[in-house]
Amino acid sequence: MLEAKEFLDPARAMGFDWYAGVPCSFLTPFINYVIDDPALTYVGAANEGDAVAAAAGAGIGGHRGVAMMQNSGLGNAVSPLTSLAYVFRIPLLIICTHRGAPGVKDEPQHELMGQITGALFDTMSIPWEVFPSKNVDVQPKLDRVVEYFEREQRPYALLMEKGTVAPHTLSPSSFTPHDHGIVVGEAFTRGDSEQWPSRAAALARVVEATTESDSVVIATTGFTGRELYAQADRPNHLYMVGSMGCASSLGLGLALSRPDRHIVVIDGDGAALMRMGNMATLGTYAPNNLTHILLDNEVHDSTGAQATVAAGIDFAAIAAACGYAHVVRAIDATSITDLLQSDRSRGARFLHLKIRGGTIDNLPRPSISPASVLARLTTCLEQS
């Protein structure tokens, strides 16, 4: 059995200082130690996919990120692992527990996943090995992880068996809830959608109000990323090409790891609905340098304009209840300029902007590969 510090101390010496996760009883002592150590960052994610995306954001920001989860939640992480970390070549360490391991008595819900966990990692082309249970094995395993990171720039997994880590009691602590934000702007009325701005008009405001030297703009998958690319292809842009719903958690990890940059996340209503739990995570953890802009046209535009349920959802009220400090409802693209130029000392900001459906004519796809987009962004970040 391993003491948590016997892994975490040498891991920290190798740059692993940023953790996001969803608890599991096998992970309890490990997570408790991370939370208690002031030299380590821990973000409690709403689900395993958001933990992966947040750790990926921290990786973009220059840290070695770790995503921790139970294998029963590994399915929630498949999309960001395969269409974010793999495609953009973002190395991160996955520490996944092995509930339902063959020959180990466990709850019935873990039976099948216990049998297929290793095969699932294999299918996702993620190399994996068993988490070390002895001190002597820690450094060699970490060396293999880092060597793979440097060679392939992609995730690596350690599978933690039951009883691997000795108990560690969590020091008394709790979150101090943020005050609810105050929503600026009247509630939307139906029937005025023709007056709403286009996505192109909204993105033009984002481009105009941000600079390459002090901001990063993350655009959600679908038409948003493609239209941002058409507006202006800049080194401080990141166009999500998959991992729908993970733009905000990626932005959270990057904002926490790079407080010197203004991180602007441009989301869509369909993507926000898919991972709405992450709004609570951002409302709790997000720093002053994060602005979350939700462009809401009430449809899945890039797949044929099928309606979402957003027509009945007050995203601004949800963001305020989750703890975003500055929340705005608007139907005018000038609200983007106002928000991006507003005081950033009060906490994270959220804008719920209604836009029309549809896109520009001859909408291009980025000609630059996702890996090249990230490499360019990394260079841009290094120049500050």
Image (cartoon, rainbow, N blue to C red):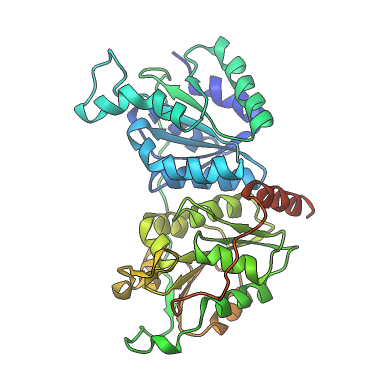
Q: Would you place residue 285 above or below residue 84 in this image? A: below
Q: Quadrant of the C terminus?
A: bottom right
Q: How many marks?
A: 0
Horizontal side of residue 321 vs 206, given as left or right: left
Percent position (x, y) of residue 234? 71, 63
When asked about the image quadrant of residue 265, the answer is: bottom right
Q: Nearer the viewer, residue 27 or 156?
A: 156
When asked about the image quadrant of residue 26, the answer is: top left
Q: Nearer the viewer, residue 126 or 10?
A: 126
Residue plotted at (63% across, 26% down)? 148
Percent position (x, y) of residue 28? 38, 30
Q: Nearer the viewer, residue 363 or 149?
A: 363
Residue 97 appears in view: no
Residue plotted at (66% across, 28% down)? 14
Residue 277 appears in view: yes
Horizontal side of residue 203 vs 384, given as left or right: left
Residue farthest along the left direction in this orientation? 108
Q: Would you place residue 166 above or below residue 35 in this image? A: above
Percent position (x, y) of residue 357? 43, 77
Horizontal side of residue 5 vs 117, given as left or right: right
Q: Would you place residue 227 above or below residue 368 in this image? A: below
Residue plotted at (47% across, 33% down)? 124
Residue plotted at (52% across, 47% down)? 54
Q: Quadrant of the N terminus?
A: top left
Percent position (x, y) of residue 151? 68, 29
Residue farthest along the front direction in this orientation? 362
